[in-house]
Amino acid sequence: MAGFSTFIIFTSVFCQLTVTATSGTLKEVVGALGGSVTFPLNFTEKHVETIIWNFRSISLAIKAKGDVLVLQNHNKNRIVFPDGNYSMKLSQLKKSDSGVYRVEIHSSSLQYPFIQEYVLYVYEHLSRPKVTMDEQDKNGTCITNLTCSMEEGGDNVTYSWKALGQEVNEIHDGAILPISWRLGEKDKTLICMARNPISHSSSTPIFVQNLCEDAAKDLNSSRVIIYIIPLLITLSFLVFVILLTMRTEKRKGSKDDMERVDSHQEKPNFCPQLEENTEYDTIPYVNGTRLEEDAANTLYSIVQIPKSVKSPSSLPAMPHMPKPLSFDNII
């Protein structure tokens, strides 16, 4: 066994120094995290002496004459050659396993070794994608962008959108989907689909009408304002007219009262001297029987009120003459 190991190491070093003449095209291999992958090797030449598998210029395993040697201890349980063929199977894949692998086949029938290279990609299984929404334009129309993304395992992920609820279902490529919706339009159902080389996943259905509730409320508010403003203007005008009418009536009533007061104050006084010289006397109450007794002794006098009274200063000055008293009218 020690001789076999020495032979393998010598062969590995020798092969790295030799010039290759035959090479296959680069093959892409895809594996899932935690899973396994097989590097297919189809070699029809007989008399194969040695097969050496390398990863990033580090030898992983050597197979010679039916014996297999895994050079690294942590790979002994991960590397196998199923069914005794030349293909290598690598299990318990990790993200660090991604990279370029190389196999060298040495045969006595070939002047130079045959080399085949592989590139391994290790991906995670996709979880449910997350959808975020940009700020909405609330001018009565819901205009925004929906963005689909993965929280984890976002390597080599492609996104697309499916729009349902229409005559023809639409497909939009890309993680960002612009949408535009107005109140009264038919609702749309949107689904984000994420895909990588080993798996795919879809988001929960998204209803555009639910996303655009704020824009719909804004539109309803705008409509309410449109209806309320003319009503408020009309009510304000009616209140103004009523107040103006009441004020006018109040002014008119005050003016009439002032005119009545003025007319009363301007009424002429025909006998100002009489008012100034008026004397009042108190007539005592007498008994009825007393009146009958004094009727024979009552003296009556006739008083005439002149039409105009002249001022004493305008009367001619006359000497004061004593006038004899007359008792002709005494009854």
Image (cartoon, rainbow, N blue to C red):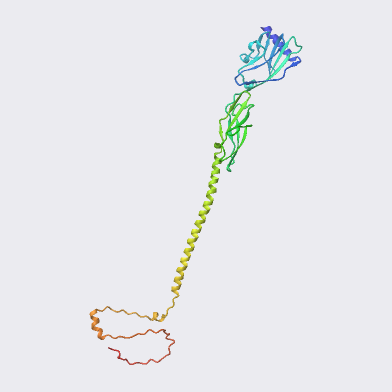
- Closest to the observer: 87 or 34? 87
- Closest to the observer: 150 or 7? 150
Screen quadrant of the N terminus = top right
Q: How many marks?
A: 0
Question: In the figure, residue 119 lies in which quadrant?
Answer: top right
Residue 161 lies, in percent from the top left, at: 61, 31
Screen quadrant of the C terminus = bottom left
Q: Residue at x 46, y 66 (%)?
A: 254
As drawn, 43 above or below 154: above
As drawn, 71 above or below 199: above
Question: In the figure, residue 172 lies in which quadrant?
Answer: top right
Q: Residue at x 71, y 17 (%)?
A: 116
Q: Residue at x 45, y 73 (%)?
A: 263
Residue 106 lies, in percent from the top left, at: 72, 11
Side of 322 relative to 113 (left or right): left
Residue 120 lies, in percent from the top left, at: 66, 20
- Closest to the observer: 331 or 117? 331
- Closest to the observer: 64 or 132? 132
Residue 58 lies, in percent from the top left, at: 68, 17
Side of 124 relative to 302 (left or right): right
Side of 7 relative to 305 (left or right): right
